[in-house]
Structures are given as structure tokens and as C-alpha cells.
Image (cartoon, rainbow, N blue to C red):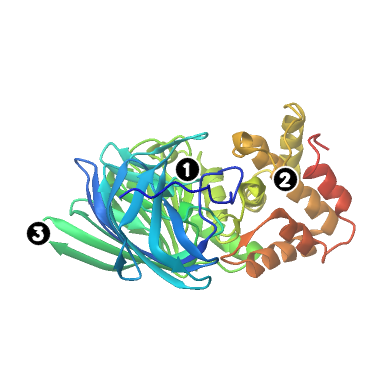
């Protein structure tokens, strides 16, 4: 039944004004899904545990128009009034819930999932030649499950997926059960650490599992058997990367370890998810040409995935930090040091248009290369001002203090003020001015 039209909910993030609902906060998602690869058919149930932040009678979940909903219940009561339109599942309750009330939502849904068309291209659920990948950033999560899709609403996840037994399923967290019945295998993953919806992923392919030896943090991979030799060469230095980043940024933030997926298809760019990085076959060709990208995606486990922006305008806190981690890895592994890379990128940045504001680049430019390099240069300038001891102490403090949290730029500059009270000119020049210093 259709929900009567009401005024629009307040906008959480002006970069994605139609995403999320500020009226409640989710604590846990439980997804119980079945997926048939050959016909791209997804069906299942999402159980969502939340608490209301205001008095609510009508609220929304984000859900792609390619998926249809057959049944909704809230707190054990079947909901008669709900509708799906414009990427929203709108739910109207028979009576109001008070602020602070528990809310257990159960949504039964299904369909043929497709990527969501966005300003940044197609995002979300995508069919491969023989399998599936999910690239959720920034608003792709609703392509495969109903959710409150904004990065500040972090929750725990349980993901159970049944599919044909020839495929391996990789999702976030620890694999806690794997059960085969006839031609189907059910894979169950638990992700206890609070995670943004866009960082939840599903990877399905004809993959073999590989465990890297001698790693302080467990590192495993899922990849086509044909790429095993190239992988062992191209990704061999991941343990050293992990050790370096633990030294510089603090403890690895997840208990389940780190997983790399290499698809049998080529990918334009690697993708990050909570505890997982996804690369294409073209990033695993035996040349080690993707080592910079391997370091970048690993660094996101601290900066972007554990410490996540509350609003997308602050994305330099993800990409600038991960880009600078590439330079730190180069410095430690025998390549050009950070000073040399900073000089190179500074020269390149000065030659580009001087119209990007790092602290608010605008939605069209939030994934612009200049956000990455200018963000890294900002950190290098900060390192020069603070000195190595204080700079890396600040990074460890940042990663620890906001572990599994949501942040804005002012949180970082405020924390940095405890290490020096002379940083305002640096911030004004690098974050709040379009001209490259």
C-alpha cells in the first residue's frame, strides 16, 4: 500500500541529499540472502535493529528501484503502509514511536540487482563475467540491501549468502559458518565492528583461497587459480606494508584480519571495503606495477574505513591520508622518499586549475585526483611543521581516538592543535584556499 506523501526529511549531507534518514540510528543489520549467479536473481530478508532519535511515525530506508519489497514488519507488527519509489522504501507506522524507542525492522525483498547510476558513474552491485562484485562508495549499498545509507550511521553486520557451490563468497568480517547442501553453499560472515553501509561488500567468483604466511595480522586472498603465480609476486610485500602501517598508524583496527580479492575481470580502479580490498586481474600481472595501489587500499583500513567521514565534503581525510601512505611505503621500501614525491606532485598540482577547495571540493570533484594529491601534500606540510615524532604521534592518536567513528575536518585540525598552536596559516593555505601554496 502506498504511503501518503509528506514533506521531505532533513538533508543529512548536501553531496548526497537523497541518502539517509536522520530520524533513527542503526546498530545491526542481518542479511539472509540467496543469489543465483546465472540469472542475476537476489532474494532474502534484511533484519535491521535501530533506535529512534526523534518521535517517528514515517521513515525511510534507502533501496534501489531494481529491487521490490514484498513484506515489512516493525517490532513484530506487519506494516500495511509502505511504498518504494525514487530509491526509497517509505514506511508509515500505525502509531508513533517515541524518541529513544527500539525499532526492529524486517524487510523481505528481491529482484535483479543493478548498479546505481550516480554522478560518479555506476556504483554498487555489478555482475562480472562469472560472478559479482559490490563497489559501494559512495551510495551503492542500496543496490543490494535496504539501509540507512550515510557514512555516519555505522553498525554491526551479519551477512549470510546462499549460492551455487562452485562459487566462493567473500563478505565483511569473519567467516563463521560454511554449509553445503546439494548444489548450494551457505556462507555466513560476522562483522562486529561498526561499519558504514558503503563499506559493506559482497564478492562472488570462482576463487581459491590463499593465506599469506608470516604476517602479524592475518592476511588472506581470494583469486582465480590462473593468477596464483602473479599474485605471489605482485602482492608479496603486503606483510611488510602491514607492519609499517601498524608501526606508523597504530594497531590494525579489525579483529578478522585483512582480505584481498582479485577478480577474473579487469577493473578500472581498486576498491576498498571494511577489511577487504578488491583488485582486477589487470592489477595482478606479474609486474608489481600496482604496488602503490596495494599500499593505498591497505591504508584505507585505518583512514576511511575505521575513521570515516561523517559528511562527504571531508573526503580528503580518506584519500589524502591513503595517498600519503603510498609515499610512506615508497620511502620505507627503497623508492623515492616522501620529500621527492611531494616535490613532484606539488609541481604537477600547480600546473592544474586552481579552483578546488580541499575542505569542500563539491560533489562533482570529490574523487578528483587533486583531492588525493593536495590532501597528501597537506599532510606532508604538516609533517614538516610538526617533525616526525609529533606527526606520527598525531596520526596514531587520530586513528585510536576515532577508531570505528565518524569525523569531520574540524576534528582533525582540533586534535592537531594539541601538537602545535601555530597551524592556522597551514590550514588556511591548504584546506580553505583554492590556490596551491
Pick whichever of labels 2 and 3 is earlier in the sequence.
3
- Camera-near label (2 vs 3) is 2
* Image quadrant in which you'd find residue 416: bottom right
Q: Secondary structure at mark 2?
A: loop
Q: Which residue matches tag 2?
A: 359
Say the numbered circle drawn on residue 270. 1
In the shown orientation, is residue 176 left or right of residue 269? left
User: Residue 434 versus residue 254: which sits nearer the camera?
Assistant: 434
Q: Which residue matches tag 3?
A: 182
Pick whichever of labels 1 and 2 is earlier in the sequence.
1
In the shown orientation, is residue 25 left or right of residue 396? left
Pick whichever of labels 3 and 1 is earlier in the sequence.
3
- Camera-near label (1 vs 2) is 2
The image shows residue 44 at horizontal and vertical percentages of 25, 56
How far apart are the alpha carbons under marks 3 and 1? Answer: 35 Å
For label 2, count other residues whose C-alpha is less than 10 Å away and answer few (under 14), some (14-19) or many (20+). Answer: many
The image shows residue 414 at horizontal and vertical percentages of 78, 61
How far apart are the alpha carbons under marks 1 and 2? Answer: 24 Å
Amino acid at each position: 500500500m502506498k504511503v501518503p506523501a509528506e514533506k521531505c526529511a532533513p538533508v543529512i549531507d548536501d553531496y548526497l541529499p537523497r541518502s539517509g534518514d536522520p530520524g533513527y540510528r542503526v546498530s545491526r543489520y542481518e542479511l539472509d540472502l540467496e543469489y543465483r549467479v546465472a540469472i542475476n536473481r537476489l532474494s532474502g530478508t534484511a533484519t535491521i535493529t535501530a533506535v529512534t532519535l526523534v518521535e517517528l511515525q514515517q521513515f525511510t530506508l534507502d533501496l534501489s528501484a531494481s529491487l521490490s519489497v514484498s513484506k515489512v514488519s516493525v517490532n513484530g507488527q506487519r506494516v500495511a503502509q509502505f511504498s518504494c519509489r525514487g530509491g526509497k522504501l517509505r514506511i508509515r507506522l500505525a502509531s508513533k514511536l517515541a524518541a529513544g524507542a527500539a525499532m526492529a525492522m524486517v524487510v523481505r525483498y528481491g529482484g535483479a540487482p543493478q548498479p546505481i547510476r550516480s554522478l560518479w558513474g555506476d556504483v554498487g552491485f555489478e555482475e562480472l563475467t562469472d560472478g559479482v562484485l559490490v563497489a559501494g562508495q559512495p551510495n551503492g549499498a542500496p543496490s543490494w540491501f535496504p539501509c540507512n545509507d550515510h557514512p555516519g550511521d555505522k553498525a554491526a553486520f551479519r551477512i549470510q549468502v546462499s549460492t551455487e557451490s562452485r562459487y566462493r563468497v567473500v563478505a565483511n568480517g569473519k567467516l563463521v559458518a560454511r554449509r553445503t547442501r546439494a548444489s548450494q553453499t551457505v556462507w555466513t560472515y560476522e562483522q562486529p565492528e561498526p561499519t558504514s553501509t558503503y563499506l559493506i561488500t559482497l564478492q562472488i567468483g570462482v576463487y581459491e583461497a590463499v593465506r599469506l604466511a608470516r604476517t602479524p595480522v592475518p592476511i588472506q586472498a581470494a583469486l582465480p587459480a590462473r593468477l596464483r603465480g602473479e599474485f605471489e609476486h605482485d602482492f608479496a610485500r603486503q606483510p611488510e606494508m602491514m607492519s609499517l602501517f601498524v608501526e606508523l598508524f597504530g594497531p590494525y583496527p579489525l579483529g578478522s584480519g585483512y582480505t584481498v580479492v582479485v577478480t577474473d575481470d579487469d577493473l578500472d580502479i581498486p576498491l576498498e571495503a571494511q577489511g577487504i580490498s578488491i583488485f582486477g586481474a589487470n592489477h595482478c600481472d606479474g609486474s608489481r606495477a600496482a604496488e602503490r595501489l596495494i599500499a593505498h587500499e591497505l591504508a584505507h583500513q585505518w583512514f576511511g574505513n575505521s575513521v570515516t567521514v561523517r559528511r562527504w565534503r571531508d573526503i580528503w581525510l580518506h584519500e589524502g591520508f591513503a595517498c600519503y601512505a603510498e609515499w610512506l611505503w615508497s620511502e620505507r621500501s627503497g623508492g623515492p622518499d616522501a620529500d621527492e614525491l611531494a616535490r613532484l606532485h606539488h609541481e604537477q598540482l600547480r600546473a592544474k586549475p586552481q579552483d578546488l577547495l580541499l575542505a569542500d571540493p563539491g560533489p562533482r570533484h570529490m574523487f578528483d585526483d587533486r583531492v588525493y594529491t593536495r590532501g597528501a601534500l597537506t599532510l606532508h606540510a604538516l609533517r614538516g611543521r610538526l617533525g616526525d615524532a609529533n606527526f606520527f604521534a598525531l596520526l596514531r592518536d587520530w586513528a585510536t581516538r576515532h577508531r570505528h567513528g565518524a569525523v569531520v575536518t574540524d576534528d582533525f585540525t582540533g586534535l592537531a592543535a594539541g601538537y602545535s598552536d601555530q597551524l592556522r596559516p597551514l590550514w588556511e593555505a591548504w584546506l580553505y584556499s583554492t590556490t596551491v601554496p
